[in-house]
Image (tube, grey):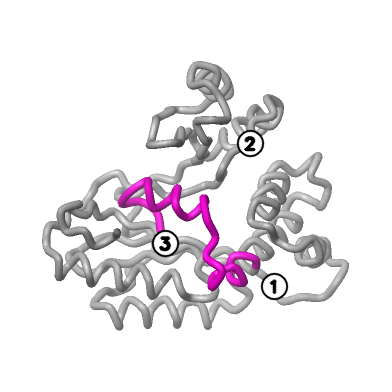
Amino acid sequence: MSGHSKWSTIKRHKALVDAKRGKMFSIIGKEITLAVKTGGKNPDFNPQLRTLLAKAKSANMPNDNIQKAIQKGAGEIPGLQVEELIYEGYGPGGVGFIVEVTTDNKNRAVSEVRNAFSKCGGNMANSGALAFTFQRKGQFLVAKDKIDEDRLLEIALDAGAEDVTTEDDYYEVICSPSDFYTVSKAFEDAQLETESADLVYLPVTMVPVNDADLGTKLLKLVERLDDLEDVKEVYTNYEMDPSLNLES
């Protein structure tokens, strides 16, 4: 889950829960297949694939899984067609949701996402309904012990990054989608390892949540969506009152 707090994003990339490891491998595999299909299987000429291979390595994804995903994308072994889809919706309290899906079965994916919204008091929205609520951005998370802040600023801003902020033990680097691979390459050239590197949806406007009942309903919807096989990421624009202590 991303959007309402950066700590949840960092938490996601710091540790993989064993129960969801299989799903993580499946999602990364589909992303690799798509990257190879669009940009070729040579990572030297496919920066998106390079990023995903690093992501797969950090997740301890078995090499056999990686190679099969590459072969599927290159058309060397048969496989179902993989698609990247974006679904938008509203949860309880009018909170906005963007759901990123990577699937080989579009009908299954949309049915499961719609059912999750319905079961949790929300509803799906038309495409583009949340266009002014979220912005598509490149996001990099870098552990503080990997680099000095001044040096990170120099590398990131010279490569076209828009902003560098400090969050707990991490730096967050934000850039436009068009500069994502330029910034990624700059980090590679500097031999700087990132904790995560993704194109994400960041909220522009936030919905404050001060009611425990509403907060519980929202967390239930996020959890239900996160548990779906095809869901890669869930982004929301709620800002939970920390005194509710619902995310601890």
Q: Label 3, on which residue?
A: 234
- Disc 2 from disc 3: Cα separation: 25 Å
Amino acid type, mark 3: Val
The residue mark sitting in front, 2 or 3, is 2
Residue located at (52% from left, 39% from top): 140
Residue located at (65% from left, 59% from top): 31
**Does the CB distance between marks 3 and 1 fall below 8 Å?**
no
Residue located at (37% from left, 82% from top): 115
Quarter of the image with the C terminus is bottom left
Mark 2 or mark 1: name the one nearer the start of the chain: 1
Q: Main secondary structure of the magenta part?
A: helix
Quarter of the image with the N terminus is bottom left
Disc 2 packing (10 Å; few <14; some 14–19; many ≥20)? some
- Disc 3 from disc 1: Cα separation: 22 Å
| Magenta region, residue range | 1-25
| Quadrant in the picture for residue 25 | bottom right
Residue located at (64% from left, 31% from top): 192
Residue 138: percent from left, percent from top: 51, 40
Instruction: Name the one closer to the observer, 39 or 191.
Output: 191
Judged left or right of residue 73, residue 221 is: left
Is label 3 in a helix, a strand or a loop? Answer: strand
Mark 3 or mark 1: name the one nearer the start of the chain: 1
Q: Label 1, on which residue?
A: 81
Amino acid type, mark 1: Gln
| Quadrant in the picture for residue 212 | bottom left
Above or below: residue 45 compared with residue 151: below
Residue 193, label in figure: 2
- Disc 2 from disc 1: Cα separation: 32 Å
Amino acid type, mark 2: Glu
